Image (cartoon, grey):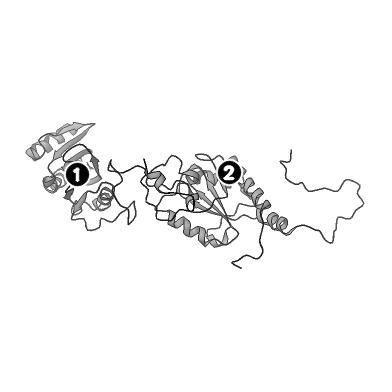
């Protein structure tokens, strides 16, 4: 019923306990994962018709703001979710790679639609057959274009993935 | 209306395009490649074909000469279209550029050049326009492999370029 997600315990009616609390205990990875999964700043790398569905899923009827993933950042340096929305050609691949490399850690990548996932029906000399050939992808959203529900499902799966990840505070780069 | 203008074009150019036909309301003029500039000059100045709509080519792999180069013109005065077609060989695929007559020819000829390898003498800028520098071959020729990708970025481990060119 709750899809395995943890629920927030609510104090029963008539409880005499105070609502104020002085401390809580948790794990570093759980705390970082919880914070990070609700503050995804997407960078929309939008190249093709899937953009229409991206606009739809961002707008109020579907409202990705509910997942903390509403505010597109138009600088890769300020974003942590690269949404590759549409076909990427070989001519464009160096640009995509550059954008990805400019993003700061931690960063995640969503392949939005079949073209970004596998090239879709563009199986030819011009189109890149899936962005995972040049950058690592965390979540693949199928569909041509994907329905907004599919995109939301993709965002939620990515959130689960982030929540389960190790979140290194000190890395080799820092 | 269009029949009258077609008849007057035919009588004016005469033997330049002896096998002219009308297909789908368009006058089709098969010509020798050398006659192109003179013919188009006549079409533009005498018959007011003031728009160059498209420059493309057709690959006939089994035929000699191998390529047709095709131009489409439109007259905003007479509201009719004309298609001009010339054959060029694979060994020397050269035709004259129409850039002195139509500014729009510059980009259209660049595309035709990168896709079919037709050279347009007189066009000073035949860099790739849809493809990229370093692309080898002409992808709309029928002997170019459909999956013959030429990536600019190194693939990640586990992905192979050669797998896709074996078609």
For the N terminus of chain B, give its image quadrant: top left
Residue A73 on image: x %, y % = 56, 58
Residue A142 on image: x %, y % = 54, 41
For the C terminus of chain B, give its image quadrant: top left
Residue extending furthest toward the bottom: A174
Secondary element under disc 1, as helix, strand or loop, is loop
Residue B124 on image: x %, y % = 22, 58
Residue A137 on image: x %, y % = 54, 50
Q: Residue at left 47%, top 50%?
A: A133
Left or right of residue B69: residue A148: right
Left or right of residue A2: residue B143: left
Q: CA distance from mark 2 to mark 1?
A: 50 Å
Left or right of residue A166: residue A144: left
Q: Nearer the viewer, residue A144 or B53?
A: A144
Q: Nearer the viewer, residue B84 or A155?
A: A155
Q: Residue at left 58%, top 43%?
A: A151
Residue at numbered disc 1:
B49
Which is more foreground, mark 2 or mark 1? 2
C-beta proximity under 8 Å, tags 2 and 1: no
Q: Residue at left 78%, top 48%?
A: A8
Residue at numbered disc 2:
A151
Secondary element under disc 2, as helix, strand or loop, is helix
């Amino acid at each position: 019923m709750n899809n395995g997600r943890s629920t927030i315990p609510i104090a029963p009616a008539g409880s005499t306990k105070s609502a104020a609390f002085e401390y809580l205990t948790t794990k570093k990875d759980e705390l970082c994962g919880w914070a990070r999964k609700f503050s995804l700043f997407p960078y929309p790398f939008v190249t093709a018709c899937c953009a229409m569905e991206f606009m739809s899923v961002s707008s109020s009827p579907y409202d990705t703001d509910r997942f903390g993933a509403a505010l597109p950042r138009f600088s890769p340096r300020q974003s942590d979710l690269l949404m590759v929305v549409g076909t990427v050609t070989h001519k464009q691949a160096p640009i995509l790679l550059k954008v990805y490399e400019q993003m700061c850690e931690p960063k995640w990548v969503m392949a939005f639609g079949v073209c970004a996932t596998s090239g879709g029906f563009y199986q030819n000399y011009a189109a890149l057959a899936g962005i995972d050939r040049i950058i690592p992808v965390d979540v693949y959203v199928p569909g041509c274009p994907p329905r907004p529900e599919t995109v939301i499902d993709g965002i939620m799966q990515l959130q689960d993935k982030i929540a389960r990840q190790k979140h290194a505070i000190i890395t080799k780069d820092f | 209306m269009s029949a009258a203008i077609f008849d007057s074009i035919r009588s004016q150019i005469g033997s330049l395009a002896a096998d002219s036909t009308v297909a789908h309301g368009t006058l089709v003029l098969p010509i020798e490649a050398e006659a192109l500039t003179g013919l188009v000059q006549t079409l533009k100045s005498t018959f007011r074909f003031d728009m160059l709509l498209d420059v493309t080519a057709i690959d006939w792999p089994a035929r000699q000469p191998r390529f047709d180069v095709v131009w489409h013109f439109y007259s905003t005065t007479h509201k009719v279209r004309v298609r001009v077609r010339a054959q060029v060989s694979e060994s020397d695929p050269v035709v004259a550029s129409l850039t002195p007559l139509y500014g729009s020819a510059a980009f259209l000829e660049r595309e035709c050049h990168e896709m079919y390898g037709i050279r347009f003498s007189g066009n000073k800028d035949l860099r790739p326009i849809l493809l990229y520098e370093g692309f080898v071959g002409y992808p709309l020729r029928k002997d170019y492999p459909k999956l013959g990708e030429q990536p600019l970025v190194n693939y990640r481990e586990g992905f192979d370029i050669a797998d896709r060119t074996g078609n």
